Amino acid sequence: MKKVTTPYRPYLREILKLLGGLVALFVVAGIVAFNWDGVEFQYNKLFCISVAANAQETEEEIIELIKTEYMEYIEDFIARDFEAVATHFQVPTMFRAPSLTVVTSHQEIAQRYANNPIQEGYEYTTADRLDVHKLSQDVYYADVDFRRYNDSDEVILQSRSIYFFSKDTGSWKMFYMNGPTN
């Protein structure tokens, strides 16, 4: 068998440092030897290179990603763009209020928002408090105090909601909502 060395060997260490927690799966017609000095193929036919990125995020980075996701959800809610609202959830999703409901598609989520009445005169929402907490490596929750206002900037609802997030779909999305409470 002929031994083939990648031409990228001098740069591999730097590439791996840049990629952080990147996991690469190489499927070849032979044995792959992978080390810090380079990649050597025992056989010269490479059938597939599949790369799955799941770089390790710090807890602080995850919290910021979740806060950003939540605020984008609020922007879509204010715009009454319920198709966009649905994209902030993974499915299946559970809603606690007014009663426990499980939805299994983004279309059902959009319909739920479109069919649930918003307070008379509703204009916009502000988050007065947005605290994100880690429950486990894969689950975080956002504890939110918020207010809804009318077009005269008068408070028409002051409430609290809890949103659970996970990264099952590749990005941090909601999978459970408890609220609003009032």
Image (tube, rainbow, N blue to C red):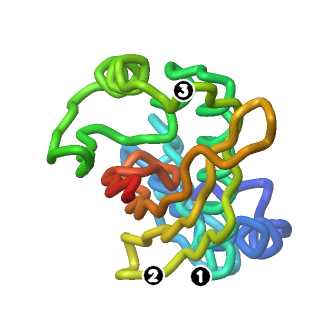
Please name the amino acid that badge 3 sits on. Glu
Q: Position of residue 121 (x, y in %)?
A: 62, 26
* Labels 1 and 2: the sequence-earlier one: 1
Asked if residue 30 is positioned above or below residue 72 in the image, the reply reads: below
Q: Answer with left or right where residue 27 lies relative to residue 93.
A: right
SS class of the residue under badge 3?
Answer: loop
Query: For this rendering, which residue is in front, 118 or 102?
Result: 118
Please report contact status of discs 1 and 2: CB closer than 8 Å, yes or no: yes
Residue shown at the point (62%, 69%) measured from the top left: 130
Q: Which residue is mark 3?
A: 120
Q: Answer with left or right where residue 131 lies relative to residue 178.
A: right
Determine the CA span between mark 3 and mark 1.
Answer: 39 Å
Residue shown at the point (37%, 71%) measured from the top left: 138
SS class of the residue under badge 1?
Answer: helix
Q: Which residue is mark 2?
A: 134
Q: Which residue is mark 1?
A: 59
Query: For this rendering, which residue is in front, 105 or 6?
Result: 105
Which of discs 1 and 2 lies nearer the camera? The answer is: 2
